[in-house]
Image (tube, rainbow, N blue to C red):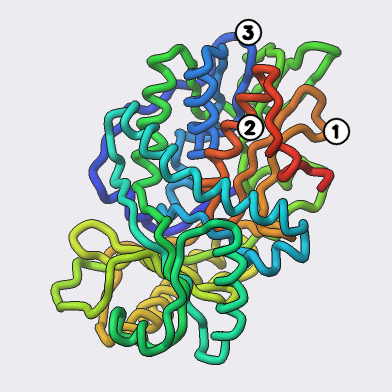
Amino acid sequence: MDLRSGRPFWLLQGDEFAPYSQLDRDKSCDVAILGGGITGALVAYHLAEAGISAVLLARRQPGRGSTMASTGLLQYELDTPLCELIKLVGKKNAFRSYQLCVGTFDKFERLLADIRDRCGFERCPSLYLASNPSEGRQLKEEFEFRREAGIELVFLSESDIKRRFGFSRPALLSRDGAQVDPYRLNQRLLERSMQRGIEIFAQTHVTQYLPTTDRVRLLTEHGPTITCRRVVFATGYETPQFLDQDIVTLKNTFALASLPIHQPIKTEKCLIWETARPYFYLRWGPDNRAMIGGEDEPYADPQKRDQLIPAKSAALCGRFREMFGIEIAPESAWAGVFGETKDGLPYIGPHQQFPLGLFALGYGGNGITFSLIAAEIIRDALLGRSNPDAQLFGFDR
């Protein structure tokens, strides 16, 4: 699957990381990790930290798929508002899902200290903005549920927003949020994992999954095989191609990074996203760039996606102009595959179709935070530890 189009901003940063070689011989290990994006990298890091012998197999060079298309927003907020999630999974599970995501920010801080690179990580508030003024009542309901769940946030009226941000729509301002360079983080996690014994191979496509009672044999496109006790699927948006269960709706999403903005902007620095679906979202990049995205379309072939990038970029720049009264121009623009689940939650854990397999599928707008949660749950499963949160994200929910 062609996961992205255009010129993602992270390719322009000049970060040079050595490429990984292709698997060229048969290997045995405790765990094989399939997928070299941010999810696979987080899984590898957590398994390495736990002393688990693992080999990571990436179909392309690690981080060059969906991870490269991410704008690097780290949110605790799901695509499904808390008030709606309660209706789908019950209050206890909905609260816990949001609380787990809130807890990831401190964990990212500890992880970044260990890899000794901030990777552009910066904690900043998150502004959940009503798409039109009439949605204030719905936002107040959402505000009350989040407060009940123990989340720190404030409700801002239209006048509050006008004074602090320059536009006039009610919003929820949460303390917890962050932004990161996802590609650099991906690479640094893999480097640290290798230092702790994880083997990593690129350009290695697994074509067959052959389980026995206690082992799995993985056949690759170029011949070498992996024999292991367990397999972790961190295969992201390519998973629906081989999983016989309708778990995600795939879409194309569009993003851009502007040229540096030299005009003063009346706003506070925070992540911004909105209640409409599909939603517009914004973060601030290096040198006062706006990094914005949205304008989702149903999943289509990459050629059609390529053709839409100029028009979608113009529409995104128009949204920015409406909010801030400033014209911006793209320095880079791109598109990527994006997926939504029926309840906004990821899928983590075993699936009956793949005995001895475990899945880490951090779908949704806060996919990177879900990926960290998935890495912890999978590590615990492989160590034989009970994790009470695993049931929240199972395929049988």
Left or right of 31: which side holds 273?
left
Amino acid at circle 1: Gln
Q: Are marks 2 and 3 in contact (CB under 8 Å)?
A: no
Left or right of 36: which side holds 292?
left
* Label 1 residue SS: loop
Q: Which mark is residue 377?
A: 2
Against 88, is 311 above or below? below
Amino acid at circle 2: Ile
Can the viewer see residue 213?
A: yes
Point out the frontmost of discs 1 and 3. Answer: 1
* Label 3 residue SS: strand
Give how far across and how far down residue 47 sits, in percent. 54, 21
Against 195, is 252 above or below? below
Q: Which mark is residue 102?
A: none
Mark nearer the N terminus (1 vs 2): 1
The residue that label 3 is drawn on is 28
The residue positioned 66% from the left and 58% from the top of the image is 344
Against 100, is 218 above or below? above
Point out the frontmost of discs 2 and 3. Answer: 2
Amino acid at circle 3: Ser
- In the picture, residue 249 is in which quadrant? bottom right
- In the picture, residue 34 is in which quadrant? top right
The residue positioned 63% from the left and 32% from the top of the image is 377
Crowd class of label 2 (few under 14; some 14 to 19; many from 20; radius 10 Å): many
* Label 2 residue SS: helix
**Mark 1 to mark 2: distance in Å?**
18 Å
Q: Are marks 1 and 3 in contact (CB under 8 Å)?
A: no
Can the viewer see residue 308?
A: no
The residue positioned 82% from the left and 25% from the top of the image is 355
Crowd class of label 3 (few under 14; some 14 to 19; many from 20; radius 10 Å): some
Mark nearer the N terminus (2 vs 3): 3
The residue that label 1 is drawn on is 352
